[in-house]
Image (cartoon, helix red, strand yellow):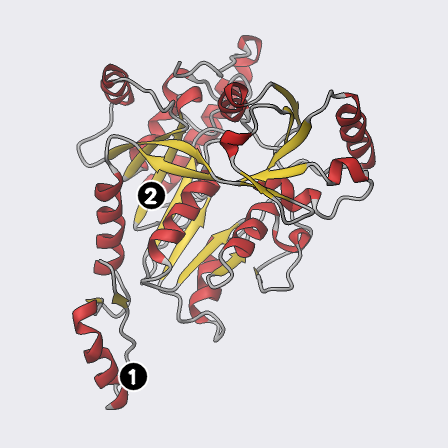
């Protein structure tokens, strides 16, 4: 049920009150203009949350990439959490995971033709993307995990809320998991309740809509997780997710909220044994030894399933034995809109990008020849074509 993964540490409430005062002062400084939010002359879409970790930012960013990448030149800008580099880094085919972080690395492997960059200072990151010769043809910037990064004023602010950790039932850090008071949701243009059960009833939608208490200018959407075909991390074999009913599964995760994945896998296999580490966990020698030992102790037939984000860190981990490497599969995750909301969401995003392009001459497929004519006649402005919109 909704909110069922929330745990409140009541004895830490006094510290939460102090934390809330600090966050409230910061937000007020932005509201009064003492701290400045900067707008850009390029479409900027922010995807973030109020809760610490685990709301599904990466699969939602990837959904936006798939929606836009064949129509405009997309750049994803992330902080690059736990990377070992500093400052602005633009990923290329040879960039390592340690240079940009696990999630940007995952996206660069999946979408090699888009720009992936990391910079803790998002304003400077956007400036670099739009001004450097290598990336100045960027048409739209997707900001990863930037809801609290208020120095950037995005054109569309998307707030993700985990169905199992609703912000309306949570408390501020450290008693709860909220980064800021739930009233901060007012800054969102679009709110998406993520990781919803696939069998959510109509009455649940109505109750969730009422409880979120959004303003008229805000749109509410619901998404659920959708799993792709399992593939071997150290091999070429693939396996359909519905073909593991005879398997004992060690579910290896280093993500903030693996509970929904556990719930989804349990009915699909003989047994699910969770081995959960903290989000963005750096696998050390003792962790690898534990993985080897746990898998060796499991009855056959057996396999290990991990996430794409964890795979980015495990592929370079040393010490995995041959048995583990030969049975280690990666489970791709996508999101799917519920209540037939996909078309409406797509329309909102595409309309925003179309109307806010720097050259404001986005055209449909039937007008593509005009772009070619203007190019040959020496017109320097670049036309972006929405071929499928």
What residue does disc 1 label? 380
Q: Between 195 and 179, which is closer to the camera in this rendering?
A: 195
Q: Are marks 1 and 2 in contact (CB under 8 Å)?
A: no
Looking at the rendered structure, the secondary structure element under dot 1 is loop
Residue drawn 80% across and 40% down? 322
Which comes sooner in the sequence, label 1 or label 2? 2
Is residue 33 shown above or below 164? below
Q: Residue at x 79, y 26 (%)?
A: 296
| x and y, in percent, of residue 141 in the image | 40, 57
Q: Position of residue 192 (x, y in %)?
A: 33, 33
Judge whether 265 appears above or below 241 on screen.
Answer: above
In the figure, is residue 92 to the left or right of 324? left
Q: Nearer the viewer, residue 119 or 303?
A: 303
87 and 219: which is toward the camera: 219
The CA distance from mark 1 to mark 2 is: 32 Å
Report crowding for label 1: few under 14, some 14 to 19, many 20 or more residues within 10 A (C-alpha).
few
Residue 373: in sight, yes or no? Answer: yes
| Numbered marks: total | 2
Q: Toward which corner of the image does residue 137 lie, by quadrant? A: bottom left
From the top left corner, tell me how far across and down residue 186 is, in percent.
29, 32
For disc 2, the marked residue is 157
Q: Residue furthest top?
A: 11
Mark seen at residue 358: none
Dot 2: element: strand
Q: Is residue 143 left or right of residue 102?
A: left
Image height of 249 relative to 68, above or below: above
Q: Is residue 109 above or below residue 50?
A: below
């Amino acid at each position: 049920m909704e909110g069922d993964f929330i745990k409140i540490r009541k004895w830490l409430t006094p510290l939460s009150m102090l934390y809330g005062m600090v966050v409230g002062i910061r937000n007020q400084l932005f509201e009064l203009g003492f701290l400045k939010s900067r707008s850009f002359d390029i479409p900027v879409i922010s995807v973030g949350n109020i809760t610490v970790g685990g709301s599904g930012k990466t699969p939602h960013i990837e959904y936006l990439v798939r929606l836009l990448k064949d129509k405009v030149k997309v750049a994803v800008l992330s902080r690059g959490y736990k990377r070992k580099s500093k400052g602005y880094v633009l990923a290329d085919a040879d960039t390592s995971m340690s240079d940009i972080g696990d999630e940007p690395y995952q996206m660069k492997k999946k979408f090699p033709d888009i720009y992936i960059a990391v910079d803790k200072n998002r304003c400077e990151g956007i400036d670099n993307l739009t001004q450097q010769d290598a990336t100045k043809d960027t048409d739209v910037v997707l900001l990863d995990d930037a809801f609290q990064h208020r120095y950037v004023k995005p054109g569309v602010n998307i707030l993700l809320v985990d169905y199992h950790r609703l912000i309306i039932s949570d408390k501020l850090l450290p008693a709860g998991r909220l980064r800021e008071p739930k009233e901060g949701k007012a800054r969102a243009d679009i709110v998406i309740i993520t990781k919803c059960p696939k069998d959510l009833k109509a009455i649940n939608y109505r109750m969730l809509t009422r409880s979120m208490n959004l303003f008229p200018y805000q749109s509410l959407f619901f998404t659920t997780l959708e799993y792709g075909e399992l593939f071997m991390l150290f091999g070429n074999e693939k396996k359909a997710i519905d073909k593991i009913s005879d398997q004992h599964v060690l579910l290896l995760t280093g993500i903030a909220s693996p509970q929904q994945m556990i719930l989804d896998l349990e009915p699909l296999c003989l047994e699910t044994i969770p081995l959960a580490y903290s989000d963005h966990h750096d696998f050390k020698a003792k962790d690898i030894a534990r993985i080897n030992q746990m898998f060796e102790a499991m009855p056959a037939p057996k396999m290990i399933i991990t996430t794409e984000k964890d795979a980015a860190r495990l592929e370079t981990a040393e010490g995995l034995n041959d048995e583990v490497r030969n049975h280690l599969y990666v489970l791709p995750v996508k999101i799917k809109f519920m209540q037939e909301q996909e078309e409406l969401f797509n329309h909102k995003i595409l309309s925003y990008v179309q109307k806010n392009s720097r050259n404001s001459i986005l055209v449909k497929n039937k007008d593509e020849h005009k772009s070619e004519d203007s190019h040959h006649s020496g017109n320097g402005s670049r036309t972006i074509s929405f071929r499928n919109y």
